[in-house]
Image (spheres, grey):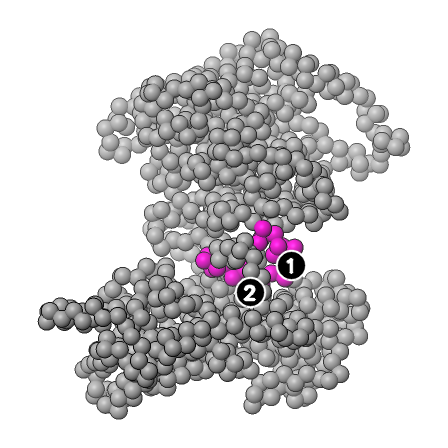
Amino acid sequence: MKKYKFKKKISPALCPSPLNIMTLIQYLKDSMDTFQKLELKLTVFEADSYISYLANKYNAYIISNDSDFYIYKVPEYINFKDIIFPGNVEYETFEIKYYSYNNKQIYEHFGLMEEMMPIFGSLCGNDYVNLEHYKELKTYITRYKSKIIFKGINKIKTQYFKRIVIFLLQMYENVKHNNIENNENNKIQRNSNNINDINISSYEDLSNLQKLILEEIFKDTHNIIEEKHRFEFQKTLIDSVREYNPNRKIQKIINKVDIDKKLSKNKFLRMNEKILELYYSNSELPIKDHVSQITNDFGSFSVDQLINHFNLTKDTLPIFASLCGNDKLKITEFSRDFQNHFYSILKDENNNNNRMDSGSMYDYYRNIVNFISNIYDTIQMEKNDKNENELELHEYVYEENKLSPLQKMMNEKIVKNIFNDHLKKFYISVQRKFSKALNKSVIEYNKIFYEEPNNMNSFNKTNNENKNKSPTENETEIETEIETETKTKNPKELAIKAIIDKNEGDSFFCTNEFIKNRVFSLDEQVLESYYASDYNIKLLNILINDHFICIQYFEMIDKQNCWNITEDLRKEMYKIMFNLNIKHSRSKYSDNDETYVIKEFTRKGEDLSNNKLIIKTKEIDELSLNSTNERFIKYLTLFKCKIDDIMDLPYFIIPCLTSLRFLLLKKLETNSFIFNKENSLYSHLSNYIINNNNGNNKENSKRSQDDLNINKEGTQKNINDIKNEETITKLYDYEFEALLASCIAALSFTYLHTNSFLKLKESETDKTSMMTSSEYLIRNHIKKYVTVGYHNLYDDLRYNKSRSLQLIHPWSIECMEDINQLENSIQIYAEYINILNTNTNTLEALKLPIDLPEFRSFTSMYHFQWEQAFHCMVNPFKLSNEKNISSIFHNLFTVTILNNNEDNTSTINPTEYINYLCDLYNKMLTRLILNI
């Protein structure tokens, strides 16, 4: 192939198909049907901090090429480049080697403290901070010289990193020198002559040391950064550090300056300070991983909500709260041996009791609930044996400073269970201390839950109190507490927050008001579908950010961009998305309410550029897409098809047929479909071109080269303009036929696999579902082929193994001989891939996969892609006079029939199977061409 010289703006590496990532997601999602422990997690905003959160929650490794994970506090980080795969995989021993890192190794290497790492990472540059925007500051740091010589600094090889470390260490020395940090109460003493633009003390999710160092940085660089950029830099740096912090919710609790206030206002599940501090220790106590849930998520629940959530009773809820730990019952004040014994009992009880759904709460809560439930069941069984039913007949009645009868019995059982056969190890005094503390704690919670019920809403009360504060007191609290903000009562916003919280989104750290408002305007069904992996992230990005990145597939850069062919189609898709999926406000790229602008990032020639698609908001509002069938008919119309085109064809053929019809008609509209006019199949297309284009394309094709070199202004174009002129790719009839044939061959992996063949034939002989176009319903169309089933990608790989059709000579040299033909075919296939991509996006925009579960199988369109087969079939179609599809299939493919120990597979005749595929090909080709 010819070698092209790419500019730095375009990577010389081949880009994967934009459908590849969707195929991966679909495979993972489909695998979840088989592997119950497999979860696919998604987030709406920045993913790095969420990945860090999940890694800590599951004690998991992160595999990525994002250097930000060197900074995050995670168990281990593996960079892709540090994975070593075996050279030979044929042997039984398959060993993958890798290097892993954690941030302790990094901060020890740089000689920094752990809490300084987020500041170091931010100054190195990330998605938040780019020092290129503050050149004076970058110059200042790169030339920074400290009066102190810091040990071990010379082992840092990268000079820029070395200067940042020196700068940070000097800031830390300044902090100590100025006595800003007070080890007694850890409070920030702000200077009366504050020169910083942001009140940093109210950012509760920053550690105190981080606040002090940031204060010092802002003071030191105050005169370095221009005044107009100073606030922006300070705010950006703070947000970046907050993003890196290991757990923002925990950090707010850990700060000692806030602990007393937090504990006094949140009476329910009051965690003592020692347990909180264990979060940052290396303790293996289960409570370590669940502090944030205990102290934050349940603080504003009502008693009834808590009882329902934990599947408890009014008697047992106070016992559960007590065993979680509080000021009355402090597990951490007992010996470490007792702590380990206590938690091991809880763990054993959990293993013997599966009454709680493992996904409904954290392990620590589930252990306690199961432990309490077992005690409760034991008491009930004992009562039943004695024919005593008092526990079930009498409701709980609160009495001040007293335990209920059930609580008294349960506490005795709990103490006996914990200390049974262990008195030699734990003296009787320990047992008495635990029993006394447990009783006091339960009595205290009885008072909180049933005498003072309003105290359960302490968080909401605290937020209401903020309304009475002055603007100065409240300005940063509202700005930095996005995740717990309740100042608005908008039901729509609350519903969206509930969906994100349910999916552990942890997403309200976002500081961009435009994006936040867009998220709160999303259709709830769309957001739920996104978290369920049924809605494309790129579509969600359109709804939130008003832009779309046209990811380039492998293509020839001297030809027209492969995305250009779907520009009008994407414009219609955007209208549908904003009509159905969001209450659209003004576009960020529009200066008025009458037009909506989507910015697309794409390729033009050898350069990257952006293209703005302008949509009238009136056109968005005028759309009426109510029923499923209405939206399906709209889908067919967008791809230039009618119901008659798909009648009597299997429903799983629809995405293939609509994509190919769209490709064909777009080429006809630009007079770039080259066909044999003497062929009766294509002869009528000449009249179509004349009638629909009025000869414009013919006239344009006669323009001289001199005309092409003249700008609209009449001046000569420069050489770069000429170089970036894009040539429309011609589609030849034999390429179109090869493309259709490759789709049929590709389907032999799923719907047209030999495993489904007999069921498919049986469905087609059923005449009970026949309809006319006026009676057509897509649901009935699908029902006709219900025996073929919904195709799960994981199951396809597991049971079908591979395509039933296999190329006899993969990548036949014949398809490489004609370089010009190969280049043209490459570009045609790139256009086809992007039509498929727009096809699946349009289906999702119309919410058809939500209403029609069978359409979810089309998410990645993997059924209709086999590029190798396409290129191998171009020459046979080109050189064949009769274009006999049967002979081409027999010459190129062999049929593989799997023996799955089923009677139907043994009855399949390879010739009969190929003949069926050929009949389907001929039927589709006729529909595609003659129905125009």
Question: Compared to 467, does 421 lie above or below?
Answer: below
Question: Compared to 822, does 578 lie above or below?
Answer: below
The answer to whether any part of residue 45 appears in the image is: yes
Looking at the rendering, in which quadrant would you find the C terminus?
Answer: top right
Residue 498 x/y as whole percent: 48, 57
The answer to whether any part of residue 5 appears in the image is: no
The residue positioned 72% from the left and 32% from the top of the image is 726
Q: Secondary structure at mark 1?
A: loop
Residue interval drawn in magenta: 501-521
Foreground tag (2 vs 1) = 2
Left or right placement of residue 565 versus residue 284 in this view: right
Question: Compared to 600, does 145 lie above or below?
Answer: below
The residue positioned 71% from the left and 41% from the top of the image is 595
Which amino acid type is shown beneath numbered disc 1?
A: Asn
The residue positioned 81% from the left and 21% from the top of the image is 704
Q: Which residue is mark 1?
A: 512
Q: Residues within 10 Å of mark 2 (few under 14, many from 20)?
A: some
Q: Nearer the viewer, residue 117 or 613?
A: 613
Residue 328 x/y as whole percent: 37, 84
Q: Secondary structure at mark 2?
A: loop
Mark toward the start of the polypeptide (2 vs 1)? 2
Q: Which image quadrant is residue 347 in?
A: bottom left
Q: Which residue is mark 2?
A: 486
Which amino acid type is shown beneath numbered disc 2?
A: Thr
